Image: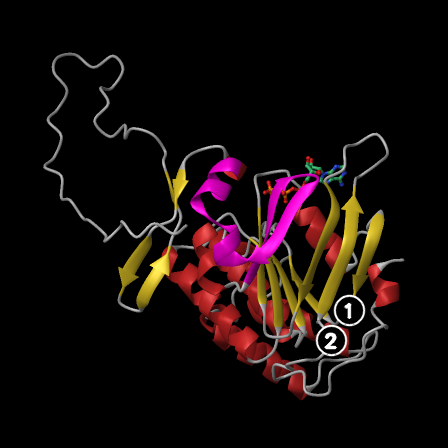
Amino acid sequence: MTVASLSRTVPADPVAGSPAAGSAPLMQATDLGFRYSRLRPWLFRNLGFSLERGEILSILGPNARGKTTLLKCLSGLLSPREGTVHGAPGIGYVPQDHGAGPSFTVADMVLMGCTRHLRAYQTPRPEDHAAADAAMERVGVAAWAGRDYSTLSGGQRQLVLIARAVASGCELLVLDEPASALDLNNQSRVLSVLSGLAAEGMGVIMTTHHPDHALHVSRNALLFVGSHDVRWGPTEELLTGPALSEVYGLPICTPTVGTESGDRVIAVPDFGPSCRACPVPGAVGAPAPAPTPVEIRIPFGKEHP
Ligand SMILES: Nc1ncnc2c1ncn2[C@@H]1O[C@H](COP(=O)(O)OP(=O)(O)OP(=O)(O)O)[C@@H](O)[C@H]1O
């Protein structure tokens, strides 16, 4: 059975704007399995999770493990070979690829998010324009409304695609690495937008290569350890130093650090010895003296289990 055919099995919640405690999950996946063909290995099997309204679920794992493929199975773009997806409400999908794309204004790109409410050839209604304007404000792209989308930077385009999905008024936002092209300030903005949408009752599923992001906003996470071992659980219990080290194949610790907003668990990979003072190949004479280091110590030490 496909996701699309299952989408009718869960009735729309009349109070979609508020978390509905005790109601049916927004989405539930059971024993999902997918491979691109019989000749290709399984990317995942026996994968299961459920997502409540108002919840953010992060999906992590190494490159090419099948995270994007899973998002496509959840969104109905691919049919899982095994298992079922129940729920599948109105979904706003933000793809990983934010390439140059079409030559539309930013305002029109975001307005396209509203087309799911329109019939073929129907002109956008005033409420669609209002939803697009609100989404542009919320995601911080309103200043570029009149600009040609294809002329924006990669990070700007990524924000516009997020705004387009937000404008759709979906119940579930599915985002493929939504912060991959963003600077730190915009990463913070997007995490805060997603948290705000979740607080209003929207479900959010996102892939990320930033364990910090998952630890900051997600109640639960899915961790691709192997094709037959995709773990689902509370983010802080799942994304421990030992588990992340095993998955990514390098030492990773997860200290708690103090920030102005409170304590936060972060993931710190050990990239090996720093090469900043390495001699330049072919350079004659003694290497230039390294600048006096300014040591900044964050209060590490309280290692997350
Ligand atoms: N249309 C396709 N046909 C065949 N194989 C595919 C197709 N799309 C992806 N793959 C393969 O499936 C595997 C998983 O790809 P996928 O994009 O889901 O990985 P990912 O975990 O999202 O990776 P990344 O972190 O690099 O974005 C990869 O080996 C990829 O080459």
Q: Quadrant of residue 5?
A: bottom right
- Depth check, front residue: 252 or 3: 252
Let me know if residue 153 appears in the view: no
Question: Is label 2's Cβ within 8 Å of ligand 1?
Answer: no
Q: Which residue is denoted by mark 1 in the rendering? A: 87
Q: Which residues are magenta?
A: 220-246
Q: Are marks 2 and 1 in contact (CB under 8 Å)?
A: yes
* Rendered position, 275 above or below 259: above
Q: Residues within 10 Å of mark 2 (few under 14, many from 20)?
A: some
Q: Position of residue 106 (x, y in %)?
A: 56, 67
Q: Is residue 223 magenta?
A: yes
Q: How many marks?
A: 2
Q: Is residue 154 left or right of residue 9?
A: left
Query: Could you tell me the amino acid type at mark 2?
Result: Ala
**Mark 2, secondary structure of its residue:** loop
Q: Is residue 33 magenta?
A: no
Q: Residues within 10 Å of mark 1 (few under 14, many from 20)?
A: many
Let me know if residue 193 appears in the view: yes
The label number, if any, that marks residue 24 in the structure image: 2
What scheme was used to colour the molecule?
A: secondary structure
- Depth check, front residue: 199 or 225: 225
Q: Position of residue 271 (x, y in %)?
A: 36, 33
